Amino acid sequence: MTTISQKLDLRQGQNLVMTPQLQQAIKLLQLNNAELADYIEAELAQNPLLEKSEAEESGDGLQERKAERDGLQDDFDQGWTGNEGGSGGLQDFDPGTSMASVGAGGSRSFDLPENSFENTIPKQTTLREHLLEQLNMTCDDARDQMAGALLIDMLDEAGYLRHGEDELCRRLGLPEERLNRMLARMKQFTPTGVFARDLKECLGLQLEEQGRLDAPMQKLLARLDRLAAHDFKGLAASCGVNETYLRDMVAEIRSLNPRPAADFDHLVVQTVVPDVLMKRLPKNLGGGWRVELNSETLPKVLINQSYYTEVARKAQERKDKDYLNQQLTSANWLVRAMDQRAKTILKVAGEIVEQQEAFFLYGIEFLKPLTLKDIAEKIDMHESTVSRVTSNKFIGTPRGVFELKYFFSTALAGSQGAHSAESVKARIKTLIDTEDPESTLSDDRLVEILEKDGIEIARRTVAKYREGLNIPSSVQRRRMKRRESD
């Protein structure tokens, strides 16, 4: 019979405890500068001891901010002439420019409203304004005007309405019959082709307006995929016309506008803002590269010690003192975590720049194969830390803005060493771009050329890379080039 008893044992073991502070540090490491700014704003709202460090933008404050720059940056600005390093015209990344003055003979002041820069730019009508004007002229019903405005807001940048009919009825609260009646009216708006659901309907609306949407043209629009493959002989048979007449039909389609909204002014899409910047150092400073955080987008916070001292002196109850100490601890940890984040990002970015220096000097064909583990071993950090640092963060380089993840790619073996997959893709594209129109390069031929260059690659890999670059096969390219020459 089993006897149930209790006993007390001592056991020693190791386990990782994710404290709130450690979780916060990991979270900060994953954020880019823009996301970090939003996070800091939330912390400023709930912690009274934190305050944002804002330098004065004019007068003495500007001079103080300039005086705080480190001596290396000052030496760089004085020693740089733009010709160091033999970079062949490779320029440093410039996140922005400022208009210090205008040309000789012009006014240097934009204080007067009539001379302001924005008043010298002609105003362009947006697609939304253009369509709303037509909607108000053709529709008197207030409910239809409201629904029509919502439909206009659903258009993509090409002018297409890609939402399904059921979804539109649900979102607008309209019966199907009324929605179809509205869409039929709005598809008559200019530019012709707006509110189409796809390319076929867009081109069909334009041909219908020109009186050219006959039976052969409808059959051709239904086979646009074969038109893209330049299968003229098969298309002529499907449309019931000869090849000469088919060429005229194709010429008409090519004269149409597949993106009816392209001629209108659009909202400017926000470009990627780099989190890290790299600059070339002049020879008198030893050459090489300098990597720094983008201070223009990096939020800065300070702890208001004087406010803490004042409030702590007046706090009498225990709960008030505990609250102040808790907020002070949280503020101190946040400042330290941001400092550690900055050091980690700089360490990872600096090692990436060092490993991929040939890419920055000579181009993508010199991009080395690199893994997260390679960087982690070099800087003595965990691979997961490198992964968090490189995710969703961008670096501004002399060759443009790249995501840090871009510099990691698999290795392809070769007789002259390993090659980066991205550099092989660039090599394939270069070979195809410079091929003889009379003798297009097949995938097998590309394999032979790459093997001569010391790159061992399978034919199916070449085909996968080519398709990933949206490059047609050699047969399709030959057919397309012959049609263009005709």
Image (tube, rainbow, N blue to C red):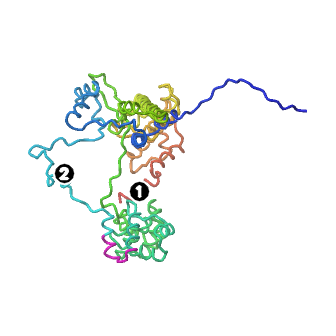
Based on the picture, tell me whether residue 392 belongs to the magenta stretch. no
Q: Say if 253 sits above or below 65 in the image.
A: below
Does 165 sit left or right of 202 as displayed? right
Q: Say if 256 sits above or below 418 in the image.
A: below
Give residue 390's position: percent from left, percent from top: 46, 36
Q: Say if 13 sits above or below 168 in the image.
A: above
> Circle 1 sits in a helix, a strand or a loop, which is it?
helix
The amino acid on which the numbered mark 2 sits, given as a three-letter code, is Phe
Furthest residue in direction left, as rendered? 105
469 or 18, nearer to the observer: 18
Image quadrant for the C terminus? Answer: bottom left
Give residue 91's position: percent from left, percent from top: 28, 35
Could you say which quadrant of the image residue 133 lies in?
bottom left
442 or 258, nearer to the observer: 258
**Which segment is the magenta one?**
133-143
Mark 2 or mark 1, which has the lower sequence index?
2
Q: Are marks 2 and 1 in contact (CB under 8 Å)?
A: no
Could you say which quadrant of the image residue 406 lies in?
top left
Q: What residue is pinned by disc 2?
A: 117
The amino acid on which the numbered mark 1 sits, given as a three-letter code, is Met
Residue at left offset 49%, top offset 41%: 447
Q: What residue is pinned by disc 1?
A: 480
Give residue 53's position: percent from left, percent from top: 33, 35
> Circle 2 sits in a helix, a strand or a loop, which is it?
helix
Q: Say if 207 sits above or below 96 in the image.
A: below
432 or 358, nearer to the observer: 358
Q: Residues within 10 Å of mark 1 (few under 14, many from 20)?
A: some
